[in-house]
């Protein structure tokens, strides 16, 4: 009995061994291996062609199903038949071979075509599979190096066939950028940088931004990875797909898919943002979820409010501040606690010089800054600094924003402008130059001519006239026949005593201004400001008097002339008479009080001057924003009064 069992056990392995030998003899293993390698190559090629050729997504699935269905057919055929030099023949069974007399003939060793084919297939599979097998090493290397992973988020593509979802192409991008920027371990390129390159490339239709184009944009932004994706609808189900792609190898690190109902769009994006962040920053998973992740990234639960907010942003980017703050107000009417919209509304009002409204909405957002993601919190602090503090504090927050993304030109331009407001032009110059350097590196022109104009003014203030002239030649290529640049060239020619070019540029500046509906009084006033700024006080007075003659009853014109006469010691008594007249109509106007106070200072009446300048300063800080000249005048009065004690 025991012998019987042992015999059965010993026969079973022999059958398996014989079956395996038969598979090899019939070349089934070799054929299946070749088929698998070929199938893998076909699948990879198909996946790489679907997107560029705009093929339906089901093509890739169909290819996989067909190849899978073909596998058993290949196994059966390879068992029954064999490919020989004489053609396809039925493979003889093992028993039939044993009945035949085997005659061994010397065989000359030669390279078979099948060997070459298998070698080619192996090499192809290795080439295609290597990046996938080792793709995580790229991220692991970045994580272990201590270098922050840089990320660019492309606008998502609306594939719902419903144009109402177009606004969310920017919306998904915006929320993802805000969320990922909240991680100190990532360096996320901001919307401004990405949009500038997209617009310069003429990609007005986001559907034209293929992964290849997105990769090019990402490399211009000097990022390690980029994210692209789409918004899809299947009945009532909304699906947001995203891919995280290596900017260098074009390999997909990971694909993400989040489903939900349409009214949960913001929650879907938040979930996607969290998944992407956790994948990129593995250390967060080891430590546990960041305490910031509970915050709603968009700062609102209302898709309607956020849709309006995105429309407001579009108007704002086009410098249509009036339209933007109207739309932001609509968003806040839907969700009064939407403090991101409140903050942007504040900035829109500020750009329209509506300081009371700007401060009101800034304070609403500022009070809730501790509930905000990191980037939005810094931006809120910066806006608060502009409205309630000084350029010194603003520069501090701009430095923090530069730490989050060092390729946003506006962060450097704004830093330069803040230094200019403090009359620190030597410090402003490298900031302005850095902004232009980023534009040049990206292969796009600046968003506006002020990038050149402000740098030109800083060069002028520091006596670097050759650099200024060279800068304007470059600027002319980006902004031909531009009013601001022509105006700056006129001032430069005037400083250098180049009367021929000064006359030419002045003529062109006046022509362009009139073509843009400037009035004669506004032209005269602007010429006076520029001439006074470069020290040409005689000509400045001439144009201030011309402006006053065109609007003799306007208090602002009187005050402009009065301040020039007082500040330059040209005619202090006339200046005081003019400012006394305007104060009769507007006794609490901080600008007029400042002129009067400075006139008193020039007359040596330091106590009266200090009281007047202090009153002006207090009103200015309440109703307007910081002014460095007013600050310096107040400090001068304080110092003089202290010397009397």
Image: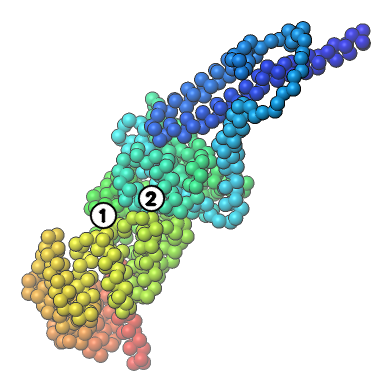
Which class describes the residues within 10 Å of circle 2: few (<14), some (14-19), or many (20+)? many
Q: Is residue 400 left or right of residue 105?
A: left
> Which residue is situated farthest in the bottom direction here?
644
Is residue 460 visible to us here?
yes
Dividing the picture into quadrants, the one containing residue 307 is: top left
List x then y, in percent, for residue 534.
Answer: 24, 78
Q: Dots 2 and 1: beta carbons under 8 Å? A: no
Label number found at residue 194: 2
Instruction: Tell me how the rendering is colored.
Output: rainbow
Q: Secondary structure at mark 1?
A: loop
Q: Is residue 268 left or right of residue 253?
A: left
- For the point 47% across and 39% down, which residue is it? 243
List x then y, in percent, for residue 146.
Answer: 58, 56
Viewer-nearest residue: 559 or 501: 501
> Which residue is situated farthest in the right direction here?
2
In primary-sequence order, the first of circles 2 and 1 is 2
Q: Quadrant of the N terminus?
A: top right
Viewer-nearest residue: 478 or 71: 71
Q: Which residue is mark 1?
A: 319
Is residue 580 visible to us here?
no
Q: Nearer the viewer, mark 2 or mark 1?
A: 2
- For the point 12% across and 60% down, which residue is it? 515
Viewer-nearest residue: 554 or 588: 554
List x then y, in percent, for residue 150.
Answer: 49, 52
Dividing the picture into quadrants, the one containing residue 264 is: top left
Q: Secondary structure at mark 2?
A: helix
């Amino acid at each position: 009995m025991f012998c019987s069992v042992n015999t059965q056990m010993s026969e079973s392995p022999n059958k398996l061994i014989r079956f395996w030998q038969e598979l090899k003899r019939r070349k089934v293993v070799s054929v299946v291996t070749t088929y698998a390698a070929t199938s893998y190559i076909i699948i990879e090629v198909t996946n790489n062609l679907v997107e560029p050729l705009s093929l339906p997504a089901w093509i890739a699935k169909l290819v996989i199903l067909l190849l899978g269905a073909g596998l058993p057919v290949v196994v059966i055929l390879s068992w029954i038949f064999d490919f020989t030099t004489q053609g396809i023949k039925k493979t003889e069974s093992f028993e039939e071979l044993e009945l035949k007399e085997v005659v061994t003939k010397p065989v000359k060793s030669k390279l078979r075509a099948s060997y070459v084919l298998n070698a080619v297939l192996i090499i192809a599979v290795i080439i295609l599979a290597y990046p996938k097998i080792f793709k995580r090493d790229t991220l692991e290397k970045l994580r272990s190096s201590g270098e922050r992973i840089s990320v660019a988020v492309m606008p998502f593509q609306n594939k719902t066939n419903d144009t109402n979802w177009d606004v969310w192409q920017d919306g998904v991008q915006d929320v993802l950028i805000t969320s990922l920027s909240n991680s100190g371990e990532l360096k996320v390129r901001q919307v401004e940088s990405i949009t500038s390159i997209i617009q310069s490339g003429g990609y007005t239709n986001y559907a034209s931004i293929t992964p290849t184009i997105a990769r090019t944009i990402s490399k211009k932004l000097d990022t390690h990875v980029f994210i692209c994706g789409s918004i899809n609808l299947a009945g009532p189900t909304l699906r947001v797909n995203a891919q995280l792609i290596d900017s260098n190898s074009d390999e997909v690190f990971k694909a993400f898919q989040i489903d939900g109902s349409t009214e949960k769009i913001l929650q879907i994006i938040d979930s996607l943002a969290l998944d992407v962040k956790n994948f990129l920053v593995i250390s967060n998973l080891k430590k546990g979820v960041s305490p910031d992740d509970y915050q709603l990234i968009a700062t609102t639960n209302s898709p309607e409010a956020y849709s309006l907010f995105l429309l407001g942003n579009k108007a704002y980017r086009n410098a249509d501040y009036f339209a933007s703050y109207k739309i932001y107000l609509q968003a806040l009417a839907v969700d009064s606690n939407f403090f991101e919209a409140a903050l942007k509304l504040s900035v829109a009002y500020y750009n329209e010089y509506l300081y009371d409204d700007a401060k009101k909405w800034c304070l609403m957002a500022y009070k809730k800054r501790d509930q905000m993601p990191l980037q939005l919190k810094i931006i809120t602090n910066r806006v608060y600094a502009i409205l309630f503090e000084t350029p010194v504090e603003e520069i501090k927050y701009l430095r923090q924003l530069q730490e989050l993304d060092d390729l946003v030109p506006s962060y450097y331009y704004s830093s330069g402008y803040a230094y200019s407001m403090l009359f620190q032009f030597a410090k402003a110059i490298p900031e302005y130059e850095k902004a232009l350097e980023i534009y040049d590196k990206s292969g796009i022109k600046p968003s506006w001519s002020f990038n050149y104009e402000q740098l030109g003014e800083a060069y002028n203030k520091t006596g670097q006239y050759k650099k200024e002239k060279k800068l304007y030649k470059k600027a002319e290529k980006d902004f031909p026949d531009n009013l601001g640049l022509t105006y700056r060239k006129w001032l430069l020619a005037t400083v250098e005593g180049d009367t021929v070019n000064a006359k030419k540029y002045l003529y062109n500046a006046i022509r362009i201004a009139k073509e843009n509906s400037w009035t004669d009084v506004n032209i005269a006033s602007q010429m006076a400001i520029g001439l006074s700024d470069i020290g040409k006080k005689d000509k400045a007075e001439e144009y201030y008097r011309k402006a006053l003659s065109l609007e003799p009853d306007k208090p602002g014109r009187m005050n402009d002339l009065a301040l020039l006469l007082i500040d330059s010691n040209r005619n202090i008594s006339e200046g005081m008479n003019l400012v006394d007249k305007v104060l009769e109509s507007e006794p609490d106007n901080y600008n007029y009080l400042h002129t009067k106070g400075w006139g008193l200072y020039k007359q040596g009446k330091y106590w009266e001057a200090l009281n007047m300048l202090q009153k002006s300063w207090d009103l200015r800080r309440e109703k307007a924003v910081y002014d460095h000249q007013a600050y310096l005048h107040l400090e001068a009065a304080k110092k003089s009064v202290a010397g009397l004690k």
